[in-house]
Amino acid sequence: MTQLTFWNSVPLPPESHPPDGESSAGDRTPTTAYLKASGRILPLKELPEKEQPVNRLHGYGPAALSTIELLAILLGNSHQLHDASALLAAFDGLTGLARAPIAELQRRPGVGTATAARIQAAFELGRRLMTETAADRPQVRSPADAAHLVMPEMMTLEQEHLKVLLLDTKNRVMRLITLYVGSLNTSLIRVGEVFRDAIRANAAAVIVCHNHPSGDPTPSPEDVAVTRQIVAAGKLIDIEVMDHLIIGSGFRWVSLKERGLGFSS
């Protein structure tokens, strides 16, 4: 079986984004087009046609647009850029918006039932893209590869989730399974369930992942105890536990394998 090369657990840096309304795309981003001297964000209908977000996306691609412009497109052309800006502010940015229950979204000005559903659908499509199971499935060569796959969803969760990545003999991702929702506790977790889907899928190895809603990925004694039990069980049934990742906020994560916690030396 292909062996993983475990790198140091250096947290992945957050993607560099300029402030909303700005872009690294230079003169392709007309920040002054929708900001008056007073700083008021103009309604979309007051923008020149070529500077409408939809037209700019067609002309320059989505990377040239600010977060506000992208969200305004999702809200619909009849909405103001101000609505998108206010929505981001209400939920403290994209991470908070991704966590927001649909009922809370619907209560915001300019967001109805259908728009709230579109917002949640957009975030879910982004998450699923990270674990796409097409012929060219992602291959995990390091803890960073695995962390990058699960972070977009797991760093936004408000409760602890225990998930398992199933890998084939070439360390390609087969599936991502959610096993538990709630605080990890050795008295509640049935270790056999960690391997149930792996056995059914004939997976060669697994990577266990769970998040810390507090944002701090530092392993707790419970985390280490759970890891030790899972690793021992995997050896008995010949399914390798490649790692146990803890996901925090701000693209922070920890590999228990690299730290030697719960894994025999």
Image (cartoon, grey):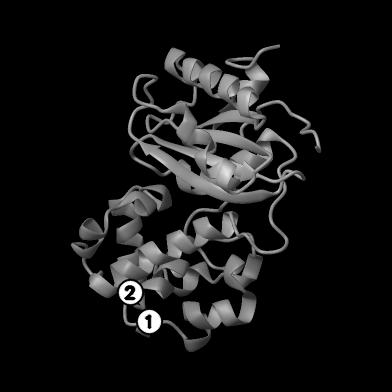
- The residue pinned by badge 2 equals 80
- Coordinates of residue 178 in the picture (x, y in percent): 44, 44
Which residue type does callout 1 highlight? Asn
**Which residue is located at x 34 percent, y 25 percent?**
188
Which residue type does callout 2 highlight? Gln
Q: Is residue 145 visible?
A: yes
Q: Residue furthest left?
A: 107
Horizontal relation, residue 264 to residue 262: left or right:
right
> Vertically, is 88 above or below 55?
above
**Which residue is located at x 65 percent, y 49 percent?**
173
- The residue pinned by badge 1 equals 77
- Label 1: which secondary element: loop
> Vertically, is 109 above or below 220?
below
- Coordinates of residue 11 in the picture (x, y in percent): 61, 32
> Vertically, is 70 above or below 128?
below
Q: Depth check: give the residue in front, 63 or 193.
A: 193
Disc 1 crowd, CA 10 A, few/some/many (<14, 14-19, 20+): some
Horizontal relation, residue 264 to residue 219: left or right:
right
**Which residue is located at x 80 percent, y 33 percent?**
3
The quarter of the rendered structure image containing the C terminus is top right
**Which residue is located at x 69 percent, y 52 percent?**
138
- Coordinates of residue 232 in the picture (x, y in percent): 59, 19
Disc 2 crowd, CA 10 A, few/some/many (<14, 14-19, 20+): many
Whole-angstrom CA distance, mark 1 to mark 2, is: 8 Å
Q: Is residue 21 visible?
A: no
> Vertically, is 33 above or below 39?
below
- Label 2: which secondary element: loop
Q: Depth check: give the residue in front, 3 or 239.
A: 239
The quarter of the rendered structure image containing the N terminus is top right
Q: Depth check: give the residue in front, 85 or 259.
A: 259
Is there a contact, CB below 8 Å, between mark 1 and mark 2? no
Q: Depth check: give the residue in front, 98 or 30.
A: 98
